[in-house]
């Protein structure tokens, strides 16, 4: 068997809905759609990545239930995807996270049976570097340990060629703009690979956090996990990007809350970041365009942060106005 048999709940990964957004960022003469990755069984786009990185290892016998240990660095969503996979196949999992990981995500990881290690001190000013350093320590300590390495594994972007194929098929191949939040670079690169392979005219807009080092020198502290990173991961392909849009944490919060108020979609921080990015570019998008925003996850993992008035007020000194009049100032 070359690959693991994928059945049960794992068979529901992919083929997520593409829905029209008519209210959150109105564009005269253009259409906006959201790819809702929260409908994957583990609740995020990273279910696709987890499945693609592990299925071959399990099917080939490299990973053996009761013996092998999967070890990975994660800000949250990939960890949940891996935890679901490992629970299904009876594998042990150690997730190395940091202090930005939400309480809901930590609870999910533990509910699936994963062991969680929290890195609290940056390495050379970088929490991602500290997480990876701890992963390397664990690989040396644990017998039969396996590191999927989402930051450099080509099976990460390969999973998202299917994501873009689903989007293109749903819109008969006509996608003018794709807004994609960047963390490992896997989703963006996989979508870009499909765009180039099929000769699509889609312009890829990379959405990054103002506090991220992927595309520039960070301009602020990054508090919201899911998009951005303390360094540029090897999978990030800058040649595929038409434009990079940086979004502050407060803009991300405002966009998430406006999305709930206007579209009744409770989404995570990286989803809100794509909404904020669209708002920044809306005056430059030609009438008649079709814009697609990848929404990586659900908002229920951010109830104690983005959707908590106390948390928002404590970090930003204000709670964003998301009434109808706020639509004009979302960016």
Image: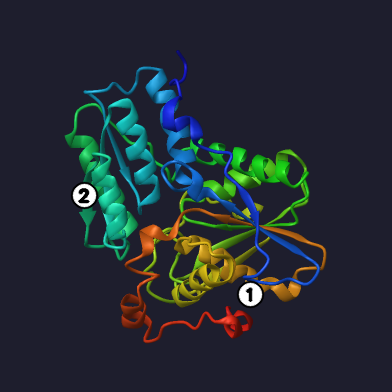
Query: SS of the residue at dot 1?
Result: helix
Residue drawn at (43%, 46%), measured in percent from left and top? 151
The x and y percentages for residue 188 are 58, 50
> In the figure, is residue 261 to the left or right of 50?
right
- The quarter of the displayed image where residue 15 is located: top right
In this rendering, position of residue 174 left or right of residue 54: right
Look at 60% across and 47% down and name the residue there: 17
Q: Residue 235, can we see it?
A: no
Say which residue appears at 39% left-offset and 46% top-offset: 78
Q: Earlier in the sequence, mark 1 or mark 2?
A: 2
Please state the horizontal and vertical placement of residue 36, each as a whole percent of the image. Answer: 55, 51
Q: How many marks?
A: 2
Q: Is residue 69 visible?
A: yes
Residue under the image location 54 percent in, 82 percent down: 323
Say left or right for 45 vs 281.
left
Q: Residues within 10 Å of mark 1 (few under 14, many from 20)?
A: some
Q: Which mark is residue 57?
A: none
Q: Quadrant of residue 310?
A: bottom left
Whole-number angstrom distance, CA of label 1 to CA of label 2: 38 Å
**Residue at the outermost top position:** 1
- The furthest residue to the left: 141
Q: Mark 1 = which residue?
A: 280
Disc 2 target residue: 117
Q: Say which of 148 and 251 sits in front.
A: 251
Q: Position of residue 298 (x, y in %)?
A: 45, 56
Other-residue count near label 2 (Cα within 10 Å), few / some / many at <14 / 14–19 / ≥20: some
């Amino acid at each position: 068997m070359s690959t693991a048999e994928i059945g049960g709940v794992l068979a529901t990964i992919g083929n997520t809905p593409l829905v029209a957004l008519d209210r959150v960022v109105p564009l005269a003469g253009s259409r906006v759609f959201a790819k809702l990755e929260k409908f994957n069984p583990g609740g995020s786009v990273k279910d696709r990545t987890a499945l693609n990185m592990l299925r071959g290892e399990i099917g080939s016998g490299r990973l053996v239930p009761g013996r092998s240990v999967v070890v990975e660095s994660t800000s949250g969503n990939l960890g949940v995807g891996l935890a679901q996979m490992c629970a299904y196949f009876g594998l042990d999992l150690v997730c190395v996270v940091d202090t930005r990981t939400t309480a809901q995500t930590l609870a999910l990881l533990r509910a699936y049976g994963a062991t969680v290690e929290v890195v609290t001190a940056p390495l050379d000013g970088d929490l991602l570097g500290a997480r990876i350093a701890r992963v390397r320590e664990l690989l040396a300590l644990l017998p039969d340990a396996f590191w999927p390495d989402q930051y450099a594994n080509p099976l990460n972007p390969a999973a998202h060629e299917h994501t873009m194929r689903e989007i293109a098929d749903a819109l008969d191949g006509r996608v003018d703009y794709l807004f994609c939040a960047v963390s490992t670079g896997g989703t963006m690169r996989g979508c870009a690979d499909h765009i180039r392979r099929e000769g699509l005219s889609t312009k890829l807009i990379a959405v990054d956090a103002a506090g991220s080092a992927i595309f520039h020198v960070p301009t602020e502290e990054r508090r919201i996990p899911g998009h951005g990173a303390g360094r540029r991961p090897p999978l990030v392909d800058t040649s595929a990007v038409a434009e990079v849009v940086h979004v502050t944490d407060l803009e991300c919060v405002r966009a998430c809350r406006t999305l709930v108020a206007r579209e009744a979609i409770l989404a995570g921080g990286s989803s809100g970041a794509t909404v904020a990015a669209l708002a920044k570019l809306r005056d430059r998008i030609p009438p008649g365009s079709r814009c697609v925003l990848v929404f990586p996850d659900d908002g229920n993992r951010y109830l104690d942060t983005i959707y908590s008035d106390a948390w928002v007020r404590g970090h930003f000194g204000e709670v964003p106005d998301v009434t109808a009049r706020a639509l004009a100032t979302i960016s």
